[in-house]
Image (cartoon, rainbow, N blue to C red):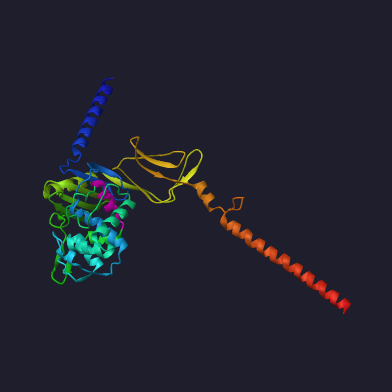
Amino acid sequence: MKINIILLVVLSFTFFISSKTFAEDNPDISSEAAILMDSKSGQVLYEKNANKKMYPASLSKIATAIYALEKGNLDDLVTVSKEAHQVEGTRVYLEEGEKVPLKKLIQGLLINSGNDAGVAIAEHLDGSVENFSLNINNYLNKLGVNHTNFQNPHGLFDPSHVTTANDLAVITRYAMRNKEFREIFATRELRWKGESWQTTLITHHKLMREQPYEGVTGGKTGYVDQSGHTLATTAKKDGLSLIVVILNGSTQEMAYKDTTELLDYGFRHYETSLIPKGTKYSNKNNQFFVAEDFYFTKSLNQSVETNINEKGLLEILQNQTAIASAQLENSKSNLTKQAGATGNGLPVTIKKYFNGILIIVLIVFFGSRFKRKRKSRRKKYIKTG
């Protein structure tokens, strides 16, 4: 009895210590809004005011870049307008009338945060900044971004130019699927040769240069008075890919501190798992399969359970709590889709096989009848001749 009481006390004390340690390990974020997202699964691992509409400053250029990469031809020569040449803020010092390849403008946009490059891109793609703003908002809506309204391609202050930390993470996650974007986003230095400016562009993101963070794969900085310091960062380590977005950091140092704290937290506590395409599951009545590779994020070194309802919704459970879900395909329904419209439900390939045989039979049948008629006529001709 005494041994049981001592064991209970020890277990209780251990649980108290571990709970306290976990609580103390939670991120302490000072910036007004922040989010930590798994890039593969899309699961949100930490958030603070993630759906509050705020000013993004130059983080807007992430959206401009992926929009340009998907809509434009990277080899196009863009003629720089007077408006692009005269835009204020950070620039790559484009000259009016200068002709610059679209890819080079996207590099200047992301690496050196060139506002003039942003205007040149917008005018080239859509004729004007106004048309660009209308089109990019429609484009982002199709990505599932619902709280963003952009008025320009660069993020200079406009009271109507707003987004959220969550929307920016979704945009960044989508953009990171594009190979060209990943390469430009990860560029630390680039030799720049323009008509009026020859230099080496160096990324503004400190975790990619003088304060390197292991595993960082890209980043974008931003600042205007109304937005405070904004920061977007991507990183990968041990198979886990993370996105961190910080909005309205009071100082640059605070924005970087919050970012590294969230990255540390993510890499310490989480891992990404994969259920490959084609994996089969079944419940009492049906068989299902995974239509596409399904990624989910779980606590590090902890097991998960799966649950499938009658409609084929797969839930991933950890500590009896659903952490992710995916709609599976019904194997029977898939067979029905492949079946032909032959009343008997035969697959299309079998239907084609029988149709071929039927055509051959008909050809043989009518061919033999034609031959018999021809012989008959020939006999009549001989008799009457």
Image spot of residue 370 (x, y percent): 75, 69
Considering depth in this image, is 97 or 330 the residue closer to the camera? 97
Considering depth in this image, is 267 or 169 the residue closer to the camera? 169
Q: Is residue 295 visible?
A: yes
Image spot of residue 255 (x, y percent): 15, 48
Image spot of residue 345 (x, y percent): 59, 50
Quarter that holds the N terminus: top left
Q: How many marks are shown on the rendered structure?
A: 0
Figure quadrant of residue 383: bottom right
Considering depth in this image, is 188 or 351 the residue closer to the camera? 351
Q: Is residue 92 left or right of residue 331?
A: left
Q: Is residue 366 left or right of residue 35?
A: right
Tell me what residue is drawn at x 32 percent, y 49 percent.
144
Q: Is residue 369 left or right of residue 293?
A: right
Q: In the image as oriented, which residue stretches furthest toward the bottom?
A: 385
Tell me what residue is drawn at x 28 percent, y 67 percent.
74
Q: Is residue 217 visible?
A: no
Residue 174 covered by magenta stretch: yes
Residue 167 covered by magenta stretch: yes
Which span of residues is magenta-colored?
164-177
Image spot of residue 353 (x, y percent): 61, 60
Quarter that holds the C terminus: bottom right
Q: Main secondary structure of the magenta part?
A: helix
Considering depth in this image, is 345 or 286 the residue closer to the camera? 345
Figure quadrant of residue 23: top left
